[in-house]
Amino acid sequence: MAPTRIISWNVNGIRAGERKGFLRWLEGCGAEIVALQEVKAAPEQLSPALREACGYQACWLPAERAGYSGVATLSRTACPETVRGLGDPRFDVEGRVLISRFPAFTLFNVYVPSGTMGPARVAHKLAFTARLCEAVRAELARGRSLVLVGDLNTAHEEIDLARPRENRNTSGFMPEERAALSALLGVGLVDSFRHLHPGVAAYSWWTMRGGARERNVGWRLDYILVSTDLAPRLLAADIHPEVSGSDHCPVSATLDL
């Protein structure tokens, strides 16, 4: 067995990220797998340097709508099997899920829809999460170890945002959204950061208004969840607010695999 480091980062536009030093960060991040969300680009729109991705094997899943959503999974070794999407066009047109079946585990790279545009998008978000639960449950039923990473667009508990009282009716912390995240965990997953740091308040997203990041008025929206069989193999789980370039920061976990 050897330590395997996995990083997840909502980059809020990979082409903008390249201008802000993404490739320098990628070259030095030390991860076996890097999962990106909100890449906002198709592979043909990327620079040659981004397509080469510092020697990582890259799988890109853009949204049909240009400049919107999209995920990418970069790995040091080629993945034998990749599934694009959840098999439901309501969600798959938005480029939100890449499922990579590595020999030791299955990786779900997920960008959950935001509900901030109103009740219809909250309903869409809840339907997406329910479908995601089904896909995770099916994968676990195959006897596979599983790691689910990404921007889940929900702060799960009060400790996961700086101002819970003021945001009880704000999408991202509404009771039904928190319940949906609880249901996802209830399928058989463990929140790696909270498992290793039960009392630590730390955030992975800050609004770009009002100096929120400098004042650390943030939300923990980005997660690495592991199947229960992998929880004892967690060596580390961290959030990296020192890394700039997006309104989110990277999150990481290291497993003995």
Image (cartoon, rainbow, N blue to C red):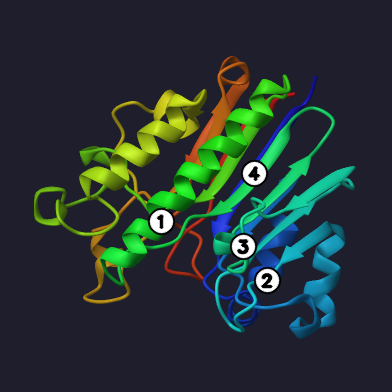
- In the image, 37: left or right of 156? right
Which is nearer the eye, 2 or 12?
12
* Residue 85 percent across, percent down from the top left: 67, 55
Identify which amino acid the numbered label 4 is placed on: Phe
The numbered mark at residue 108 is 4
Between the residue at mark 1 and the residue at mark 3, the CA separation in whole angstroms equals 14 Å
Which residue was labeled with disc 2? 62
Instruction: Name the front one of labels 2 and 3.
Output: 3
Q: Residue at position x 48%, y 52% from top?
A: 128
Disc 1 and disc 2 in contact, CB within 8 angstroms = no
Q: Which mark is residue 90?
A: none
Q: Quadrant of the C terminus?
A: top right
Of 190 and 3, which appears nearest the observer?
190
Mark with earlier residue (2, 4): 2
Q: Which mark is residue 89?
A: 3
Mark 4 vs 1, N-terminal side: 4
Q: Earlier in the sequence, mark 1 or mark 2?
A: 2
Q: Quadrant of the N terminus?
A: top right
Measure the alpha-carbon separation of dots 4 and 1: 17 Å
Question: Pointer 1: what residue?
Answer: 125
**Location of residue 117 in the rendering, given as x and y in whole percent from the top left corner:** 31, 72
- Judged from the image, the secondary structure of the residue bearing numbered disc 4 is strand
Within 10 Å of the Cα at label 3, are there few (<14), some (14-19), or many (20+) other Cα atoms?
A: few
Residue type marked 2: Pro
Q: Nearer the viewer, residue 168 or 46?
A: 168
Q: Amino acid at mark 1?
A: Lys
